[in-house]
């Protein structure tokens, strides 16, 4: 996006056109209070900002509509904004027209057909801003943010009070919410996040929901499958107690399912059961008591094994320590009985003879043998404990079966008491059997479980792949790589402008939104560097380096850089401002270096990058004068004098 012209319309319908050349350095020079700085405010307003920031005075008194004609990659756009109503400082009303050969419209053709959001959305899409979303880190209170044209424009403008500010690097950085918005959106504009990041985030959310659903289905099916034996045996017992099955002793799962399925096909009768519910309940309760006693016995046996293991472990620890001390004897040569009264280390006579080494060696052999015996017994104990666990698991499953059967029979007994009708009681049990077998057919078989496991693995693979593509560590690495490329240009241009700390590495710190130059004593952020000349110089090289990267990488940022008063540090007096040339030779050379750098970058990137500079500077060099588009001196200004005079009438 380049700016072809800024157009102002007064209430009488007159038009003021300030034209620019796309893809070049454009200079607007002139005296103070001629409207140079307002060009930046008008451009930002026309590109979608709601608040009017133009200075109160001739501009706001005379202008009825503000407009810009911009060149886009494939077309042109005419954007016009009506001035807010009297007493108001903002408006969302706008006009947007697109066309390959558009020129500034006449006043009579102006009409509201859009709003500021529409302008940002459509122009942003036309310069390549795709759907995107920055999601804050876990625990952050701020909402996700989508980068749009309004954020991109923040990278294209530098007001007079910003370009020489040592504390602020970007346009409007000090306003509430803008600093964080810049931190969140710059990675997207630099290309450090995938172009389809927002789509992938949506896909990841859908994939995670799908994964949770499959996981829940799988857990339900697994629980049902694990309890199949228990539930089937309980239903068989209940059906037998009501005389619906001839025997409670049915083989495995398949036999029980077949028996219960056949039962569902058998008509219900009032024929009495061979055994009463009470009799069956007493039998089941006796089985339950026996199973509970069996579990207690198994638990006691397990406790004995645990005590034995703890004792053996304690013995092993103590024995190993003693054995390790005795093994040190092997480091010493054999000794005779005559030498037992001498110290083995220094040879001096001992008050008491030391124990014979052979006795100590025998003790070591005994301890070693005992340790081996303990270690040999361990595998047998582990096998016995495993067998105990298996027996306990079987007993617990049998206990669950019996308790489930008891619960079913008690429910049946209550149903019989309420209905006093055996057929109704049998119908109740039959309904329970039908419901359970239906659930079992749906999700309780091994084939269904295998299918759910496969679906879970596929869904998990999709989630992992999408999460890896959105890995924040990868994003940070990509961002660092891009900032290094930008830092190379900044370092080179700092040398060219003869800035303080030149010759060192100069880089952007996006976490703090500042410039850092490395020195012998450590990193120096911009606010620790002195002199307005350095602040302006570092601002300039940072924004030129960013835009060089945006252009060369085809990033969706307007290829437009507007700078207001970049040479302000070199024009301290009103006389110098009116003349346009600093009186000091060093200052003149510094101003020339600034504009030469802007010229060189614009020439290298032509016809992509457009640089518009509003400044007092009016250098005599031919290349400079060829870049001057407007010279507002000796009565010429943004607002024609006749507009002001007409308003006064």
Image (spheres, helix red, strand yellow):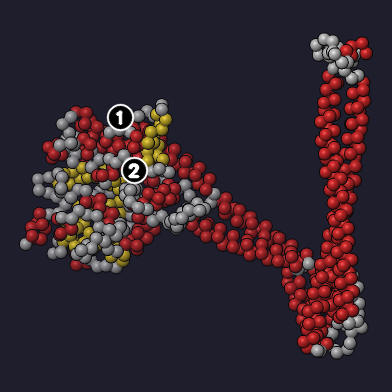
Q: Is residue 169 left or right of residue 234?
A: left
Please tell me which of labels 2 and 1 falls first in the chain: 2
Number of numbered discs: 2
Labels 2, 1: front one: 2
Are dots 2 and 1 in contact, CB under 8 Å?
Answer: no
53 vs 615, nearest the viewer: 53
Of helix, strand and loop, which one carries label 2?
loop
Residue 122 at what x, y percent from top left? 36, 61
How far, Cα to Cα, is label 2 from label 1?
20 Å
Q: Is residue 246 above or below residue 466?
A: below
Q: Is residue 355 left or right of residue 107?
A: right
75 vs 352, nearest the viewer: 352
Looking at the image, the residue that sits furthest to the left is: 649
> Can residue 116 be seen here?
yes
Q: Which mark is residue 597?
A: none
Quarter of the figure with residue 337? top right
Residue 412 at what x, y percent from top left? 80, 81
Looking at the image, the residue that sits furthest to the front is: 351
Q: Residue at x 22, y 28 (%)?
A: 586
Q: Residue at x 33, y 51 (%)?
A: 175
**Image quarter of the C terminus:** bottom left
Of helix, strand and loop, which one carries label 1?
loop
Q: Which mark is residue 498?
A: 1
Quarter of the figure with residue 309? top right
26 vs 418, nearest the viewer: 418
Badge 1 crowding class, 10 Å Cα cut-off, few under 14, some 14 to 19, many 20 or more, is: some
Q: Residue at x 41, y 27 (%)?
A: 521
Q: Where does label 2 land, which residue?
A: 169
Q: Is residue 287 left or right of residue 163?
A: right
């Amino acid at each position: 996006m380049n700016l072809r012209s800024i157009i102002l319309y007064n209430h009488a319908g007159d038009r003021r056109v300030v034209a620019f050349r796309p893809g070049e350095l454009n200079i607007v020079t002139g005296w103070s209070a001629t409207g140079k700085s307002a060009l930046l405010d008008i451009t930002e307003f026309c590109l979608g900002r709601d608040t009017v920031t133009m200075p109160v005075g001739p501009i706001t008194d005379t202008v009825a509509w503000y407009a810009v004609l911009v060149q886009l990659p494939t077309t042109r756009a005419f954007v016009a904004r009506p001035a807010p109503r009297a007493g108001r400082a903002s408006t969302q009303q706008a006009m947007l027209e697109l066309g390959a050969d558009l020129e500034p419209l006449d006043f009579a053709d102006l009409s509201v057909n859009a709003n500021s959001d529409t302008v940002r959305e459509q122009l942003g899409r036309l310069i390549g801003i795709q759907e995107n979303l920055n999601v804050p880190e876990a625990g952050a209170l701020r909402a996700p943010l989508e980068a749009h044209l309004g954020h991109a424009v923040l990278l294209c403008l530098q007001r007079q009070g910003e370009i020489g500010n040592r504390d602020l690097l970007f346009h409007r950085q000090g306003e509430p919410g803008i600093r964080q918005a810049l931190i969140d959106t710059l990675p997207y504009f630099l290309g450090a996040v995938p172009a389809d990041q927002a789509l992938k985030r949506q896909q990841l959310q859908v994939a995670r929901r799908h994964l949770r659903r499959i996981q829940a289905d799988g857990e339900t099916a697994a629980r049902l499958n694990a309890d199949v034996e228990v539930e089937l045996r309980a239903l068989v017992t209940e059906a037998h107690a009501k005389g619906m099955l001839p025997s409670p002793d049915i083989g495995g799962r398949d036999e029980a399912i077949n028996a219960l399925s056949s039962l569902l096909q058998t008509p219900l009768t009032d024929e009495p059961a061979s055994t009463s519910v009470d009799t069956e309940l007493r039998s089941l309760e006796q089985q339950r008591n026996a199973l509970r006693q069996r579990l207690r016995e198994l638990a006691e046996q397990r406790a004995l094994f645990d005590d034995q293991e703890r004792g053996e472990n304690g013995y092993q620890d103590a024995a190993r320590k003693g054995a390790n001390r005795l093994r040190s004897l092997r480091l010493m040569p054999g000794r005779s009985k005559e030498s037992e009264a001498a110290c083995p280390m220094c040879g001096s006579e001992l008050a008491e003879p030391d124990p014979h080494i052979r006795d100590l060696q025998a003790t070591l052999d005994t301890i070693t043998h005992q340790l081996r015996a303990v270690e040999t017994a361990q595998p047998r104990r582990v096998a016995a404990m495993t067998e105990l666990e298996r027996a306990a698991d079987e007993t617990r499953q049998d206990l669950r079966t019996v308790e489930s059967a008891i619960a079913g029979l008690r429910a049946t007994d209550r149903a019989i008491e309420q209905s006093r009708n055996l057929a109704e009681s049998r119908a109740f049990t039959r309904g329970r059997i039908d419901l359970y077998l239906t659930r079992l057919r749906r999700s309780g078989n091994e084939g269904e479980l295998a299918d759910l496991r496969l679906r879970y693995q596929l869904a998990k693979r999709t989630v992992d792949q999408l999460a890896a593509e959105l890995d924040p560590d990868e994003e940070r690495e990509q961002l660092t790589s891009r900032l290094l490329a930008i830092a190379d240009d900044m370092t080179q241009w700092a040398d060219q402008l003869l800035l303080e700390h030149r010759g060192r590495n100069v880089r952007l710190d996006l976490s703090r939104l500042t410039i850092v130059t490395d020195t012998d004593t450590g990193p120096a952020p911009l606010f620790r560097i002195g002199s307005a000349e350095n602040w302006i110089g570092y601002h300039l090289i940072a924004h030129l380096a960013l835009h060089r990267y945006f252009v060369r990488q085809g990033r969706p940022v307007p290829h437009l850089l507007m700078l207001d008063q970049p040479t302000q540090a070199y024009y301290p007096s009103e006389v110098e401002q009116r003349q346009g040339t600093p009186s000091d030779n060093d200052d003149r050379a510094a101003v020339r270096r600034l504009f030469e750098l802007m010229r060189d970058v614009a020439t290298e990137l032509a016809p992509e990058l457009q640089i518009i500079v509003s400044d007092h500077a009016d250098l005599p060099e031919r290349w400079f004068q060829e870049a001057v588009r407007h010279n507002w001196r000796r009565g010429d200004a943004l607002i024609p004098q006749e507009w002001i005079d007409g308003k006064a009438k």
